[in-house]
Amino acid sequence: MLMMTTTSGASSSGSLAKGAPVSIGISLSLSGDFSADGLAYQQGYKLWAADLNKAGGLLGHKVNLIIKSDASSATQVVTNYKTLISVNHVSLTFGPFSTLLTLPSAQTVNRYGYAMVEGAGGGPSVFSAGLSNVFDVTLPVSYDLAPFAHWLTSLPNSKRPTTIAYATSNDPFTQPVVQEAQKLIGKKLKTVYNNVFPAELTDFTSIADAVAASHAQVVVLGSVDVPTVSAFMQAFEQAHYTPKAFVATAGPDQGKSFITAVGAGNANGMMVPNSWYGGSTNPQSVKMVAEYIKLYGGTAAGVNADIAEAYSVGQVMAQAVTATGGFNNAKIIKYLHSGKTLSSVQGAVKFNSLGENLAQTAYTFQWQGSKFVEVNPVTDKGAVKVLFPKPAWG
């Protein structure tokens, strides 16, 4: 838990004593399956709060983050937000990590009249729940693999792989991404393996071995974390199987955490979809990345995308608070639904009626040596040539 100071009189209506700190309630997975991402999100939220407080706070109020650990549990995350609102009396709420935890969180805070701005709940289940209070600053996940699918199917016949394998967790984040990729790729590649496995699975050996045995030339993995991707990579290496292209929905975007887990040699050629990367030329992003490196070391390529997502949440909420002149959640919700275009380290943010941000662009990124680079859409001026086929395991 971080900074347990509470703010008296705070509520969804925004009453806040003059000079009092503004408390923001957050539940994060500081342990459990999503802990790597939860800890990265904590860094991103804290970095944003520190920057804002240096600049005088939010409408003159110092920002106080109250962070509770949900242990990656959908039950605990609900308890945490109830406590943050009814006991800690926070003025605002930020989202947790993952679609799985965002939906029950948004439903809970909605009952109290609170807005929930978040950056990691982009699965369709969040937006189809009929909630007016949830806003995801990141591009919806359904679009994530579209550039990869277009690149793959647009390759000339002489270079295009002929077979593909799909393996995905039934997590509400990963499954829609992979299903959409399957639709886009269609029959242009023959599916030789297709499996949906339980999200709670911890031993991926048999599934990875089956993928390897299929000899698929392309692998699409629906993963939520580094350990899942690492397990498949290890199994493939042991089976002496290297697909020509290997894309995972999450894991390779985790920067230093990913490289540390799998090794730089093995990371070479791995691909992942996202709407941000450490080498972004967005001036706000350049500033944030420099601050992060000053605090934690490393390089721009090693900065976890979760950092940018969390930081963007803070930026968007701050703009809404400033525009509405206070902490009234009803006014904040109305403002975020107004169609205004906001800015963030990830780029433009403009919410549709569901709370989706469709103003950003989906990209595919790839590890090429020690560099994490954009490779498609291939028509984008910032894209470099895809490293294809993927080099053998390092």
Image: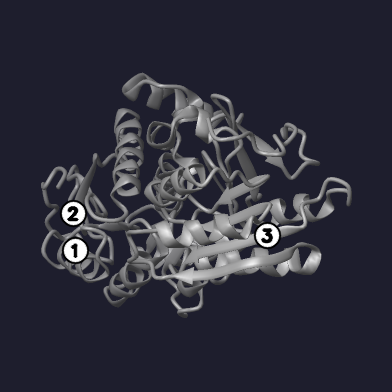
Mark 3 touching mark 1, by CB under 8 A?
Answer: no
Which amino acid lies under the numbered mark 2 shown in the image of this protein? Lys
Q: Is residue 390 left or right of residue 12?
A: right
Instruction: Identify the residue shown where x is 63% and y is 50%.
Output: 360
Local crowd size for mark 2, using a 10 Å CA cut-off: few (<14), some (14–19), many (≥20): many
Q: Is residue 253 left or right of residue 82?
A: right
Which amino acid lies under the numbered mark 3 shown in the image of this protein? Ile
Q: Looking at the picture, tell me which residue is in the foreground, 161 or 50.
A: 161
Q: Where's residue 151, x and y in %?
A: 77, 49
Instruction: Identify the residue shown where x is 37% and y is 48%.
Output: 227
Quarter of image, res 212:
bottom right
Q: Which residue is mark 3?
A: 164
**Element assignment for label 1:** helix
Which amino acid lies under the numbered mark 1 shown in the image of this protein? Asn
Image position of 287 with respect to 273: above or below: above
Mark 2 touching mark 1, by CB under 8 A?
Answer: yes
Q: CA distance from mark 3 to mark 2?
A: 41 Å
Q: CA distance from mark 2 to mark 1?
A: 7 Å
Q: Which residue is mark 2?
A: 68
Q: CA distance from mark 3 to mark 1?
A: 42 Å
**Element assignment for label 3:** strand
Disc number at residue 80? 1
Q: Looking at the picture, tell me which residue is in the foreground, 285 or 171.
A: 171
Residue 351 appears in the rendering: no
Count numbered badges in the picture. 3
Local crowd size for mark 3, using a 10 Å CA cut-off: few (<14), some (14–19), many (≥20): many
